[in-house]
Image (tube, rainbow, N blue to C red):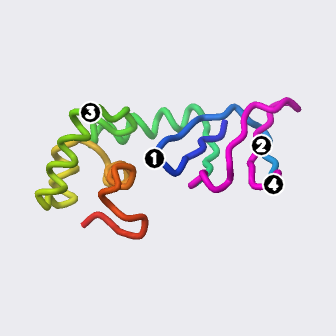
């Protein structure tokens, strides 16, 4: 299984055992059959997943960040935008949203509130 993190803070899990590169496109294969493809320019990162270890990682993250790896709701995005515009600190955002700092940074970038080269303070 490969997690494909995309530029718009989206991701997909592809059941692949092989990747090939073809004219700016990453092609994913499983047992000789194509199972997906994405433009290279849209891919931010690739991560090999072990179903067991990823489940444990989510459980561990949710002990301190209850909303880690959950889909963002409109209400949460509105709260994030408001708090960010009110100059909330990283720790205040983490506490208010119950999310990990990396997830908050990624969402801020998706909302065009944080530049790609900018870090959450």
Residue under label 2: 27
Q: Quadrant of the N terminus?
A: top right
Assess whether mark 1 and mark 4 are in contact (beta carbons under 8 angstroms): no
Which span is picked out in magenta? 22-44
Residue beneath disc 4: 23
**Residue displayed at 16% across by 44% down:** 96
**Mark 4 to mark 1 CA distance (whole Å):** 24 Å
In the rendered image, which residue does mark 3 sit on? 74
Instruction: Report which residue position mark 1 lands on.
Output: 9
Measured from the top left, where is residue 89 in percent x and y? Answer: 17, 61
Contact (CB < 8 A) between labels 4 and 2?
Answer: no
Mark-to-mark CA distance, 4 and 2: 10 Å
The answer to which of marks 4 and 1 sits earlier in the sequence is 1
Asked if residue 33 is among those painted magenta in the image, a careful observer would answer yes
Characterize the local packing of mark 2: few (<14), some (14-19) or many (20 or more) Cα atoms within 10 angstroms: some
In percent of the image, x 17 and y 47: which residue is there?
95
Residue 6, given in percent of the width and then of the height, sits at: 55, 47
Q: Secondary structure at mark 1?
A: loop
Residue 21 horizontal/vertical position (percent): 80, 52
Is 47 colored magenta in this rendering? Answer: no
Point out the tag, 1 or 3, that comes first from the N-terminus.
1
Q: Earlier in the sequence, mark 2 or mark 1?
A: 1
């Amino acid at each position: 299984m490969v997690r494909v993190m995309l530029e718009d803070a989206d991701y997909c899990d592809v059941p692949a055992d092989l990747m090939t590169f073809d004219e700016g496109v990453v092609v994913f294969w499983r047992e000789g059959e194509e199972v997906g493809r994405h433009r290279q320019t849209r891919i931010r990162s690739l991560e090999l997943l072990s179903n067991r270890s990823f489940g444990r990682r989510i459980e561990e993250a949710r002990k301190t960040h209850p909303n880690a790896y959950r889909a963002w709701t409109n209400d949460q995005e509105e709260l994030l935008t408001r708090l960010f515009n009110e100059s909330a600190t990283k720790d205040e955002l983490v506490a208010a949203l119950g999310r990990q700092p990396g997830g908050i940074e990624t969402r801020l970038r998706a909302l065009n509130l944080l530049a790609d080269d900018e870090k959450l303070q």
